[in-house]
Image (cartoon, rainbow, N blue to C red):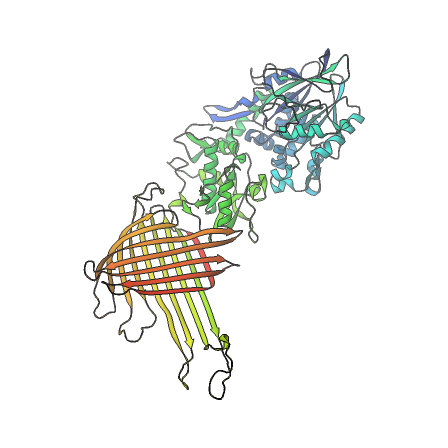
Amino acid sequence: MKTAIAMLAIAVVVPVVARAQSSYDVQSRTIARVLASGGIGGRFGRPLCQHGLTIEPSQSALFTYALVREARSPDAPMVLDTGGLLAPHGVARFAAVSDPTALAELVDRLGYRALAFGVEELGAPRASLLDVIRSLRRRRIPSIATNLRCEDEAVVLCDLLVDAGDRPSVHVVDGRPMAVLAFLPDDAATQIAPENSAGLSIVPIAERMPEEVRTARAMGAEVVVAVAAIETEAALELARELPEDGRPDLLLLAGSGELLFARPSTVVPAIAEAPRGDAVEILIREGLLRAGYEMVVQPLGGRGIDVGEPVLDFLDRIGEDYCAEWGRVLGGGLLTRELDANGLAELAARVVLEAADADVSVINLGAIDERWRTAREDALTASDLYIALEYDEPLVVADVPASWVVELARRSADQHLVTPGLERDGDGARVLGRPVNARATYRVVTLRFLASGGDGALPALPEGTTWSPLDVGTLRSVVLERLQRGSELDAREALEDPAVTPEWIVSANADGSFSGSSIDNPRRPDGTPLYDSALLNRGDTIALGLEINLRADATAPDWSWENSGLLRYRAQWTPSMTPGVAGAFAEAVDQIQLRSLGAWRGLRVDPAHWYVPDAYAEIFLESELSEPPGRGWHWMLFRPTIGARFPLTSELDVKLSTGLQAQLLDPNGEAEWGVGAVVQLRPWDIARIEQRHVTLQGLLDWFVVDLGDQNRWQLRGSFDAMFDLAGPLALTLGVRLYMQQERADQLGVALDATAGLRLGWLGRAVGPEL
């Protein structure tokens, strides 16, 4: 908090005096009282719906006994709520739909004279809330949103509110006119669903408050009370910067619910806030020897003794209907251990993941009532879901790139997101337990509120990617439908684990290269070149190359199956040095390779235990398109092996193997036993520029046969570097190495390097379960 602002904070048991215009202690008298509640959220009752009980009063309603008593005092105090009195708790939502008059009557009997219309009400189901507000208006209890404007379909809402188009709401409190203003946060429209925000606009608090304070003074208000849904630091800054004639006498906050009293030094107004789910009493005192007001903020006396009679009557009135409609036990809601609010958020997100057949599900903890607890210890009821899932949102899906998934993993903890299917892995991420593939896309399902930018929680989608509605229902309806299916398992264990289903990554790459030169250097009569330039003293050449790589890899928690195919061919045309003889193409590269490897990872409990190997079996086949002259047989090397694989990292592993090797088409060939080792670098992104990647991968495969005699060994190596261009195109640099030696003979080496353009495709799928 800025050092220029002094703040006083007190414990809830100690009253504090704030002087609006003087720091001197002078005799004063109380001229009015304000009783303010905050953070109630419609939490008047906790459903039980068993053993003949319906709804019991909640802890959040314990302040109501004292509130009713004080509201009936002869001085007629101003009793108001700072926002969220009517929403979003399930009991209040049920009453708003089934018996809106009962909810309005409760507010009236509790003694409320005005309600700040908060973000909770703004985001509540609109039709039922309007019925409650109408009933409150008939009882002369205004709902106030001083900085809200409405157009088009939202006009019906503002017609029932004291909004930006109305004069301030003025009440007589202990014989004095008192104006009550209430301000929504500047970003309120981004905190609610699109259908509720349509047609709404919010006038900034700093702009609207001074105007309304001046208007209230002009209307004769002796005391101006303003409610603002902002946090403490923002309120202190606002109070310091308000013009002198635009400052209310008292600023009540509806932000964190933690601060009881604070004020900037030497600046009006005093700032107070009720503890969350409670109420405070503010005494407004007038000095006898000077002008201005003093404020005393203190806990509401007698609170916590009992629940007010109006609350008990309200719960009795709706209890039986509530339990009849929402109190049923869910057939798939068996609980064998405790389930808290965070656990239910995880359960709901997993249900959505299953319903959407997605890779990652995202919901925000703000959609869950953090104070919720199950009505029964052994099972979930429909009421539990109606209470816990406070905000019911449509679901949307999108196919997003790996970079978006990684960014989501990085911000999920800070944004209080629940993301089953996704976990952070260092600077990267894992989806369904597997490292993300930089070229793959992933199906993500989330709430429309988050997809629309709500809370700024999700990364922005890349250009060309959009969220699409998922026609399976809303968050609450999807979870209800799933948990209504009968099951003898705990609700959490009955859900399928998508991580056990194989993930398939299928890719196809075609690398092309071309080079050529055409030389025409005139000849002298004696046949010598006319020009001596180096560029003109070369022969015509054409080189064409093609490399095709195909892969199909499946991974599951305890096994993997990797398959690859390679075709490499390059030919070079050169003119004949013999007069009258045409030039010809000569093969420079001719190679076909097939590999198929199956590995079992059941020995390793923790993926980080690289020293615990994976058992594997592999078949390797190498051949050629055309047989070179003079050999007399077609190359067809076949090598089945078994061994152990050590995954040093998710990109790098080492394999030790033993097996047989044979030339199948060599008339004199025979199978020979040998041993080998392989070092494999899987695609590894060493750099990322926005959506572009620089990716490296490589392989070294060494195998030796006829040990102790000829000791024939072969080393095959490959290295690839790739830089993404646009769409499926990429620049590539490839190096291929082959070495062979037997006994003490000279070493044979073939080294080939190419650079070219790659056309690539990669697809990803999950399932079927094997």
Residue 85 against residue 18 in the figure, above or below: below
Q: Farthest residue to the top: give it.
A: 27
Q: Position of residue 489 (x, y in %)?
A: 37, 36
Tell which of 359 and 73 is nearer to you.
Answer: 359
Quick check: can you spot residue 16?
A: yes
Query: Which residue corresponds to the image point at 37% horizontal and 72% vertical from the top-left?
Result: 587
Residue 759 against residue 313 in the figure, above or below: below
Q: Could you tell me how many numbered marks the image carries?
A: 0
Q: Farthest residue to the bottom: give it.
A: 525
Tell which of 402 and 750 is nearer to you.
Answer: 750
Q: Is residue 483 left or right of residue 116?
A: left
Q: Quadrant of residue 302?
A: top right
Tell which of 573 and 295 is nearer to you.
Answer: 573
Q: Position of residue 88 (x, y in %)?
A: 58, 32
The N terminus lies in quadrant: top right
Residue 742 against residue 234 in the figure, above or below: below
Q: Farthest residue to the left: give it.
A: 709
Tell which of 104 and 765 is nearer to you.
Answer: 765
Quick check: can you spot residue 228?
A: no
Q: Position of residue 393 (x, y in %)?
A: 55, 40
Q: Position of residue 148 (x, y in %)?
A: 70, 36
Q: Quadrant of residue 91?
A: top right
Query: Which residue corresponds to the image point at 54% horizontal and 51% vertical from the top-left?
Result: 690
